[in-house]
Amino acid sequence: MSIFRIPASRVKTGAIASTVTFFCLAVLYFLPIGIPHKLSFPLASLTAASLWLCPWQVSLALLFSAMGDYAGSMSGAGGPDWAQTCFLLQMGSFLCAHIFLIWFFTERYFTKVEHDRKLTGKAKGYLAMVVFCIIVLLAIAFTRIIPGAPAGLVRTGAGIYACLICLMLLAAMLQRSSLYALGALLFVFSDFILSWNRFVEPVPHTDLLILFPYFLGQWLIFIRSTSFRIAHEMRIMRF
């Protein structure tokens, strides 16, 4: 249930208007225009729209994501200590976002998905593939990425974050929805590129590789959680 109510007749208009606004603000970020904190604008716009269009858990996940983007945009305003503080704030904000997404996906699974699920051979294969991919991601995180993080709070937080984002991905992949699955995959891909660039070695074209999948992934989760349907979902990533 959304935080505020909107008539069903206005859902389509709201979803389209918020989508256009979001992508315009996302494009604005990549333009060479010096606007302070413009990184946080796209998710802030989705957060505002979600108050009427999305379940409250998704709204809070988008809000904490926007806060994480704002903290990330502040990191260049000071020295190394300030940058680390901003990174911790950013990571903490996204930790909260993933907690609310896990909450939403778990609740949705047990109320809408689980009763319709049949554990066929295809379903078992799908689940095995998902679990295997999650294990591989965690292995990469704990053997290649997290050891490169500064010891102490940052490394501990990175380990917790890796576990939570993989749990969020697992929950999304169990929704019988290709849009939720793809949105979560793009979110995870973006964060892994960001972490690799920060703790392992520089990655070329980081803005594009991090933010394009991040923005698209967030929008997919947003639009799928509304009652507006663009078209029937493809049957990929479903079981």
Image: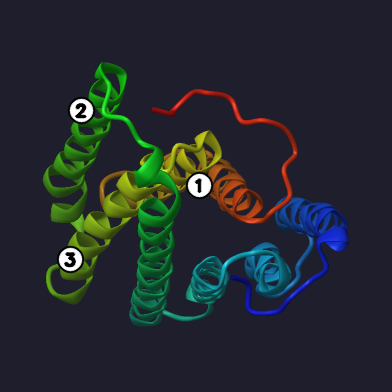
The relative height of residue 222 versus residue 209 in the rendered view (above or below) is below
Task: Report the side of 58 relative to 87 (left or right).
Answer: right
**Disc 1 to disc 2, how far (Cα)?**
28 Å
Residue at position x 51%, y 34% from top? Answer: 178
The relative height of residue 143 versus residue 71 in the rendered view (above or below) is above
Q: Are marks 1 and 3 in contact (CB under 8 Å)?
A: no
Pointer 1: residues within 10 angstroms few (<14), some, or many (20+)? many
Tell which tag, 1 or 2, sits nearer the viewer. 2
Dot 1 lies on which element?
A: helix
Q: Amino acid at mark 1?
A: Ile
Task: Report the side of 221 relative to 181 (left or right).
Answer: right
* Residue to which mark 2 is pinned: 128
User: Residue 205 placed where, x, y %?
Assistant: 53, 39
Q: Of callouts 1 and 2, which one flags the residue occurring earlier in the amino acid sequence? A: 2
Q: Of callouts 1 and 3, which one flags the residue occurring earlier in the amino acid sequence? A: 3
**Disc 1 to disc 3, how far (Cα)?**
21 Å
User: Residue 82 placed where, x, y %?
Assistant: 40, 82
The relative height of residue 2 versus residue 123 in the rendered view (above or below) is below
In front: 107, or 181?
Answer: 107
Task: Report the side of 18 relative to 136 (left or right).
Answer: right
Q: Amino acid at mark 3?
A: Arg
Pointer 3: residues within 10 angstroms few (<14), some, or many (20+)? some
* Residue to which mark 1 is pinned: 210
Q: Report the disc number at residue 155.
A: 3
Dot 3 lies on which element?
A: helix
